[in-house]
Image (cartoon, coloured by chain):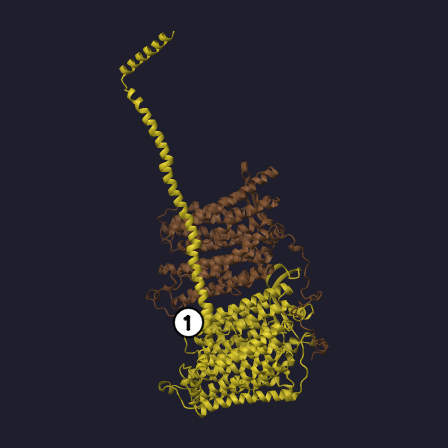
Chain colours: A brown, B yellow
Amino acid sequence: MQFFHDHILSIILFTPVLGLVLLLFIPGANKNAVRWWGNIAMFASFLVSLPLVFWFNSEAPSQQFKFIERADWIPSIGAQYFLGIDGISFLLIMLTTVLGFLSVLSSWTAIQERMKEYYAMFLLLQAGMLGVFMSLDFFLFYVFWEVMLVPMYFIIGVWGGPRKLYAAIKFFLYTLAGSVLMLLGILTLYFRYHTDTGIYTFNVLALQQHGWPANLQFWVFWAFMIGFAIKVPMFPFHTWLPDAHVEAPTAGSVILAGVLLKMGTYGFVRFSLPLLPQASASPVIVKIMVTLSIIAIIYGALVSMMQRDMKKLIAYSSVSHLGFCTLGIFALNPHGLSGSIIQQINHGISTGALFLIVGLIYERRHTREIKEFTGLSNVMPVYATLFMIVMLSSIGLPLLNGFIGEFTILQGAFEVSWHWAAWAVVGIVLGAAYMLWLYQRTMFGTCDNPKNQVLKDLSFREIATLVPLVIWAFWIGLYPKPFFQVLEKPVTAIVQRVNPSFFQAPPAVSAAAPLAPRPAPAALAEPPADPAHSAPGVAH
Amino acid sequence: MMFLDYIWLIPLLPALGAFIQLLWGRKLSNNAVSAVSVGLPGVSFLWAVGSFLQFLSLPEEAHHVFTKVIYSWLPAGAFHLADGRLGQFSADVGFHLDPLSSVMMLVVTGVGFLIHFYSIGYMGHEGGYYRFFGYLNLFMFSMLVLVLADNYLMMFVGWEGVGLCSYLLIGFYFHRKSASDAGKKAFIVNRIGDAGFLLGVMLMTVTFGTLNFVEVTEAARSGRFGVGDGVMTAICILLFVGATGKSAQIPLYVWLPDAMEGPTPVSALIHAATMVTAGVYMVARSNALFILAPTAMALVAAVGAGTAIWAASIGLVQNDIKRVLAYSTVSQLGYMFLACGVAAFGAGIFHLMTHAFFKALLFLGSGSVIHALSGEQDLRKMGALWSRIPTTAKTMLAATLAISGAPLLSGFFSKDEILWQSFASPYGSKILWIFGVVTAGMTAFYMFRLFFMTFAGKSRVPHEVEHHIHESPRSMTVPLVILAVGAVAAGWIGWPKALGGSNHFEHFLEPVFENPMLRIAEHQAWSLEFGLMFFSVAVAAVGFYIAYRWYVKSPETPERVAASVEPLYQVLLNKYYVDELYDALFVNRTKNLGNVLAAFDLGVVDGGVNGIGWTTRLTAELSRLWDLWVIDGLVNVLAFMTKLLSYPARILQTGRVQSYALLIVLGVLVFMGYYILHF
């Protein structure tokens, strides 16, 4: 047990790898065995991550990073096998293991060809994603970051739709172009650290402690920014996303939207902000990042509204939602950051579920054209109900998850500038518009199309893929406290780095405590009221 | 303290009902569905009454407010207030019972329960019975969260929740496109208002550091903020934007008339008695802030008065029984805002309460009429129903009299209180009063027009419908009668001093609205109030008389009048073409922008990416050709040259030993000759 506890991260990381190795021994012709094993391995990956939930809060409460594992890997260049998680990576890891299992479960009948390779790719992908969120060594991080690309490339390119090759290559090259710039940034820091201290290290925590010159921070920030912005994707680097989403098989879309996009935002939070605090907080960069985020929010929503393909619609809605996440990050305050991370989880839940929902109907009809479907709620009431809940969570209805994230981000943005919040709020209105319109066009009305009239409602397995996400959505909506608790420490640490004076403000002990009366602005001031009528005693 | 300690049961019981219906309702019989979904709100009503009585019996010092925090909902962490201090954001799931919210709670549970009960009969033959009650229960939960919340954010939870239920219930007949369109329109228009509400909430957070009602009110009354403070004005205007959405005021009222696509009990409960009054409640709840923002108050009063007359004028000519009532609701909500805008919050809430009775009754009555006529809603196909459906007719008459302001009925007291305040309050003006009085006249006209067209004159009912006409079942008429009692008598608790009463209602609400910064009206002579009251009753009587002349005495008059002012009539009939205007200005433009941006995304942004890809491939192709022809060409040329140069040498290389020997001999001879010649 002690061993299990001390190496929990490695165990989580290598469970999918072990599953992959064992999968290779199962004959590919035995489809059922392959399928069962793929699901068992992914479920095992979820199960071994579960103890984190129970251990996380009590583990090393004074440390930001917990469950640290550290060993020399390539001593000659200073690369280490260095794992550790804080609240941010903890939540993203749980999202990964949950979505990983559900997406594989959703492929049970959808994938019939090259089944063994398919499950192998997913197990490899899972390991890559988990590694990205656990690594505290830049070299290790970069390895996982690139490892992850390969299985996704194959998942889109082999099991994808009609334009799968175009989409797969676009996805791969676009992301790679960004990663290479990021690598340049990493190497710049690596060599500069050696110049300054005589030590070669990729240790992220050590690099964080180093005082980087502002000029260097600036350039490295842009190198990182391109890499992460492509991954997020931020406007205008987003066009690989609709293609990749449309062409990928359902499970691929779920993972792509649910987890892969979060790597970009995670990169900003984990690396850009704490490593390059002066650059990240410089007014020019904040202005650019926030402007791009707000454009993404509104632009993504407007473009989404006019799509004819359901998956493309959801893909553009992701651009809009991720715009909220990056907006929160560059508000550089606790509300913005914790809201952003919660919204990243929310987006994984809601958009993951939306892609599952589109996948369910695609598997039945082999089309995703919105106009092909009307009145589905007549023939598939369970499906319509689940779709409704997921839609509401996506448009940020209170008591569901989306509201918690959006509100906290908006509040964080508002604290910096009300203009930001006022623009971003437009996205909330448009978000309701495109989702309700989609829902109306597909679910409401009469079901005229004979092809739709014979559709079967969801099976038990299909319901099982959605229900955990729905429960999670309600959990965050009703009782988000544990999530904020887990995030408090890392978010505070980041804010202290990028905005050191933030926590030095005088505390407001009681908000209602009388301070000196504020003078009313002259232009708006009323002539003093007749004292006889404004004195408390005289009223009534 | 049993009731108050478990006050959270009041919203939770209907939520339980919704949960049961939406998960298992399909498998339940209609009787089981009604038992659960009407029974639970019934218990909830009893619990509310119990809580109210307990609240009244609290000791004097705790009399004004009872709060109960259940858990900390959104502890979002540290933030900077606008004045630079460091605050901790937290919003609780907590309940707040004071005179204001207890009035709302009783209205919502009481009227809500009656409408649930009515729905048993009304919805009995409809498909999706369980779904209807599930949504209706969910609505009760949301509305009760809205009125019982102890902070603005939780109020927003209820606020959005009722919006959702409204969307679901308007679109209840979802196979009809007009119904699902109307639901969507309601939700999106409300969202525009909500955006304002949210921004207001955020501004409040950074200004006060808290969203708790008690704390915000205390801070606002503490003297920290002066009257006319710009931030207060901004907060109030943003909140009011939210209110215009939910309570259907200019410019966001357009969704409410369309909302009549929903089943009639829904129109009664959500779109007349409760949900649409949420904006009024919210403004009244924020009275401490509004008092500091006279500009916002003036805006509220102006929008209220403007909406009142605007919607009433549309209501004059509509022919759909429910649409007339819908515009009437918009107009009456305008009255309530007018009251709030002149700082007569108590009067606004008073009218809210009386309106809940008579308007719910009007809608349920119209539902009973529609039920009797097998679904007919067109006033032009009704008439002479007085003796055919007598209970409905009599209760409708009571409600019509009440809304028209017939003396001593509920609407009379509340409306005259508003008119009086709009005249006499230091925030009021004569223009506001004139708007109010003209609206009162219009109200009497269109309501009696509706009444006469339905119940009096000659029958215009088509023959095939004629013999189906029947009075509605008990489950529908009993709520009508109870509501009729309310419509008549609910106003008596607010009997004004001018008529020798003591206005218990406003006295009860006083702790909520008391404010040192409130400018109180000079005491005016009772005779003036009495005179104005008489005048407005006279105006209403004129409205009644015209309706009587035109629709009972000489039914050909309306057509003649309409023909003589044809353009005006068309404008009113087409609701000032506002829907068309909004479509052209906003909806279509947004869609067009979406299309343009989608094309831009495909052409330019993605085109750029593809362009880079294409350029890379072009460069690669050019490189290939360059490599093939130039680089490799050079190598080949070099090779060719080498080959060319080596050609002579190849001739020598014969492979025959004799030739080599000969050459060796020749070479030796040449060298030897060379040496001999030089030495």
Residue A434 figure quarter = bottom left
Identify whether B423 is placed above or below B205.
below
Q: In the picture, residue A378 is in which quadrant? A: bottom left
Q: Position of residue B39 (x, y in %)?
A: 51, 76
Picture residue at 35% right of the left edge, 48% below the top:
A29
In the picture, measured across the screen, residue A352 lies left or right of residue B301, that is left
Under tag 1, what secondary structure? Answer: loop
Whether residue A448 is visible to the viewer of this picture, yes or no, is yes
* Nearest to the observer: residue A474 or residue A291: A291
Using residue A75 as the reference point, say whether residue B180 is left or right of it: left
Foreground of the two, B221 or A287: A287
Is B531 positioned to the left or the right of B254 in the image? right
Q: Name the residue under label 1.
A: B174
Q: Which residue does the image show at 50% across and 83% down from the upper left?
A: B361
In the rendered image, residue A324, in percent from the top left (x then y), is placed at 52, 58
The percent coordinates of residue B586 (x first, y second) are: 47, 68
Residue in the foreground of this view, choosing between B140 and A262? A262
User: In this view of the protein, which residue sits in the foreground, B435 or A346?
Assistant: B435
Q: Position of residue B538 (x, y in %)?
A: 56, 89
Residue beneath the point at 41% across and 48% down: B613
Above-or-below relation of B528 to A380: below
Query: Can residue B105 be seen by looking at this rendering?
Result: no
* Image vertical order of residue B59 relative to residue A314, above or below: below
